[in-house]
Each structure stands twice: as C-alpha cells, then as structure tokens.
Image (cartoon, rainbow, N blue to C red):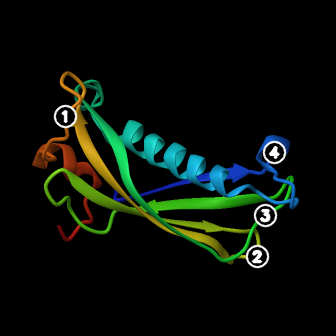
Amino acid sequence: MSNTFRLTFTALPEHIDENGHVNNAVWVQWMERLSTAHWEALAPEEHQRAYAWVVTRHEIDYRGNIRLGDSVEALTEIREGPKGARFDRHYTFTDAEGRAVVRAKTTWAMIDRRTFRIMRVPPEVAAPFLPEAS
C-alpha cells in the first residue's frame, strides 16, 4: 500500500519531436502509463474489473526536457483522498542530474465499467492509495 509509485522512462526515437527532445504529448502518455501501473500494482482484481479512470484535467509545468537516449525517473503521488468521484495525482519527472524537468497535476474521475458513468470513489477503492496519515 502506497500513495507513491515510480517508473523509469527512456526517450526513444518515436518520442522525439522536431526540436530534438521529448514531445509534450509523450509526457502526458508517460503520466498515463505511470498512473495505470500504480493502479494495477495496488488495486485488487475485482476493483480493476469494476472501475476505470478518466482524466478530467491536466496542469503541466515544463521546466526542462530530455533528448534521445536520456532517462527520467517518474514519480506519481496521491497527496489526499478523493473528493466525490475525483482525485488528484501529482507527478515529478527527474533527469539524471536530479533536476525536475516536468511537474504536473492531473485530476482523475472514477467510472463504473458497466454503465460508463462517473461515480463516487468508494473508501475501500481509495484506501490502498492514500497517504499514511489519511
């Protein structure tokens, strides 16, 4: 159980834009992969079958970038419990020198896979992802 999760991403040729660095859309894809991996690592199978997540908002600060072959350590953190159907994930992508090159906050909403309707996050679904003090 943890409100944080980490992965490493490496810039491949398909991630590089005409400016020679990782395209902004790729950072969003990496946020989604990181979030999905966190959900799959902690959520019980029955929750994964019953619920899905959709993004309702992104806030991204680009403070640097990486080039072909460079890697970043990606951290996602859930700092507080859900508010109804929604909760926020925070992201930090750190380069090899330890600099945060991208910081972001994304608001996610839970949907019921049967009805595809947004629904309030049940406490038992949120519990594995909450900070220790929650």
Q: CA distance from mark 4 to mark 1?
A: 36 Å
Badge number at residue 97: 2
Residue on which the image places disc 4: 12
The mark lying in front, picked from 1 and 3, is 1
**What amino acid is labelled 4 in the image?**
Leu
**What amino acid is labelled 3 in the image?**
Ile
Name the element at disc 3.
loop
Q: Residue drawn at (80%, 41%), measured in percent from left and top?
A: 14
Q: Residue drawn at (40%, 36%), measured in percent from left and top?
A: 40
Q: Are marks 3 and 2 in contact (CB under 8 Å)?
A: no
Q: Are marks 3 and 4 in contact (CB under 8 Å)?
A: no
What x and y, as percent, mark residue 32?
50, 46
**Is any atom of residue 51 visible in this view?**
yes
Residue on which the image places disc 1: 117
**What amino acid is labelled 1 in the image?**
Arg
What x and y, as percent, mark residue 130?
25, 59
**What amino acid is labelled 2 in the image?**
Glu
The mark lying in front, picked from 3 and 2, is 3
Reading the chain from its start, which is encountered first: label 4 or label 1? 4
Q: Are marks 1 and 3 in contact (CB under 8 Å)?
A: no
What x and y, as percent, mark residue 34?
51, 48
Reading the chain from its start, which is encountered first: label 3 or label 4? 4
The mark lying in front, picked from 4 and 1, is 1
Q: Residue drawn at (75%, 68%), measured in percent from left and top?
A: 65
Q: CA distance from mark 3 to mark 4?
A: 11 Å
Name the element at disc 1.
loop
Q: CA distance from mark 3 to mark 2?
A: 11 Å
The mark lying in front, picked from 2 and 1, is 1
Residue on which the image places disc 3: 66
Name the element at disc 2.
loop
Reading the chain from its start, which is encountered first: label 2 or label 4? 4
Residues packed near mark 4 inside 10 Å, few (<14), some (14 to 19) or many (20 plus) = some
